[in-house]
Amino acid sequence: MEANTGINFFPEAAGMIIPEPRRISEERDFRTFTKEKSHGILSGKKKEKREAPHMADQFRENPLRLAFGLMRLPKNQNGIIDIPQVCEMADRFIAAGGTYFDTAFVYDGGGSEKAFRAAVAERYPRDAYTLATKLHATIGARDEQSAKQEFQTSLERTGAGFFDYYLLHAMQRSMYQKYDEYGLWDFVREQKEKGLIRHWGFSFHADPDLLEELLEKHPDAEFVQLQINYADWDNPGVASRRNWEICKAHGKPVMIMEPVKGGILADPIPTVKAVFDAAGKNVSYASWALRFAAGLENVHAVLSGMSNLAQMEDNLRTMKDFRPLDEEEMELIRQAQRALEADKSIPCTSCHYCTKGCPMEIPIPEIFNVINRRKGSPEFRTIREYGIVTNGRGTAGQCIACGQCESACPQGLPIISLLQKCREELEK
Ligand code: SF4
Ligand code: SF4
């Protein structure tokens, strides 16, 4: 049963023409998977010592290391995912040597997985791509059965037949126990035994102590997806550096998410722009962020949630002939980090996890964006913009402090008190 997400996703009905795929370059090296070992880890064998497999050599080669994140896909003016543009982006990505696509059951209420099917699964042979998707125990699920049903629904929506990478989604202090309560760790092991998952792991948005605990309890997890970017490297609320070090110590390859921090580092605050502009390199701000993340050891893929062809082209330019940051460039990153530390913007990544259960339908990230843009630009028409984003929806002042949003926020933002401040500034 598929959750009623309210998303419109009928590209053909919307008159969209789905383009034919381009021929895949002859140069592409489609290596087959290394034959995976079964680790014999299933329900009923919980007391057996779980073997930590050798990781990186089992993954399919990912020479480009860029992953096409399908979280922020382009939409047309009717709010429907723009499938022709997604097709074009997927074609460019695959032609450039990209293989790794990353989606999730909850992205765009299921629209992201369906878009993957239309743009990739139905247009390319199965060995042209690898697919990662995720099961979320609370958003989109009300109990064990509906959580497990997400797996089957994702198989149907994506049309991929099996998942190359399957993740338990967004471990946070406020809800990670649900994955135990619903038996989801063993559930993914069972799907792997059935051949429906090649590799499984989890994505993580919490503190280093919890990461240690999870890796101790589940040493057979094959990888971890972490939020890593230069802005959050030493941010105690995200702990990019410490969590990456822990994964390295446990021998877990890392998939990096939010290398550009939800787009914030593609269009950073003026003081950060000034740091990079002074270097006179004539490259995008996003490229600095991508190179910082991709230059780290022990990284299998860097996911970038791309929203248009221009972003795809820019990322491909950065990653095609990848060059890690040298010492001089690292010094610029340190300067940018200091500029960000001095900034008081709300570090919201616009993931929208908080809005799904808000009883007052408050457009939380859009309101935070209005406040942030106002700070960066004195001439910004704040009240007018605030009126636009809240038109027909809840306002900051209508928050009833139920706390639903705070338990869902991967960034751990104190949303209720932030909205209170927004109300004071915007509803005077
Ligand atoms: S605390 Fe406020 S903003 Fe958050 S979910 Fe509840 S009503 Fe919405
Ligand atoms: S407030 Fe948190 S959950 Fe909501 S969009 Fe921003 S980062 Fe995501």
Image (cartoon, grey):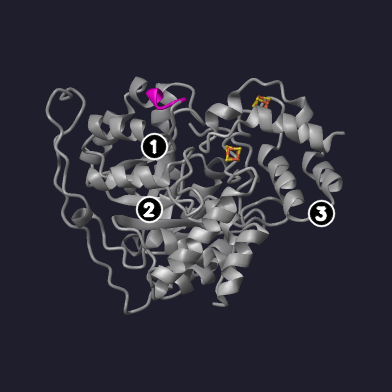
Residue 134 visible at all: yes
Q: Is residue 344 left or right of residue 61?
A: right
Give x and y (percent) for residue 51: 14, 37
User: Is 175 included in the stretch rendered in magenta?
Assistant: yes
How packed mark 2 is, by other alpha carbons closer than 10 Å (few <14, some 14-19, many 20 or more), is many
**Residue 57 coordinates in the image, percent (x, y):** 19, 57
Residue wearing tag 1: 151
* Location of residue 167 by image quarter: top left
Quadrant that contains the C terminus: top right
Q: Residue at x 59, y 73 (%)?
A: 278
Q: Earlier in the sequence, mark 1 or mark 3?
A: 1
Q: Residue at 37%, 53% (x, y): give it.
A: 131
Q: Secondary structure at mark 3?
A: loop
- Residue situated in front as seen by the camera: 206 or 167: 206
Decide which of 375, 401 is in the foreground and name it: 375
**Residue tagged by mark 3?**
380
Does residue 76 show up magenta in the picture? no
In the picture of the structure, the residue carrying the numbered disc 2 is 131
User: For the residues carrying marks 1 and 3, which lies nearer the camera in this image?
Assistant: 3
In the picture provided, is 348 more to the left or to the right than 173? Answer: right
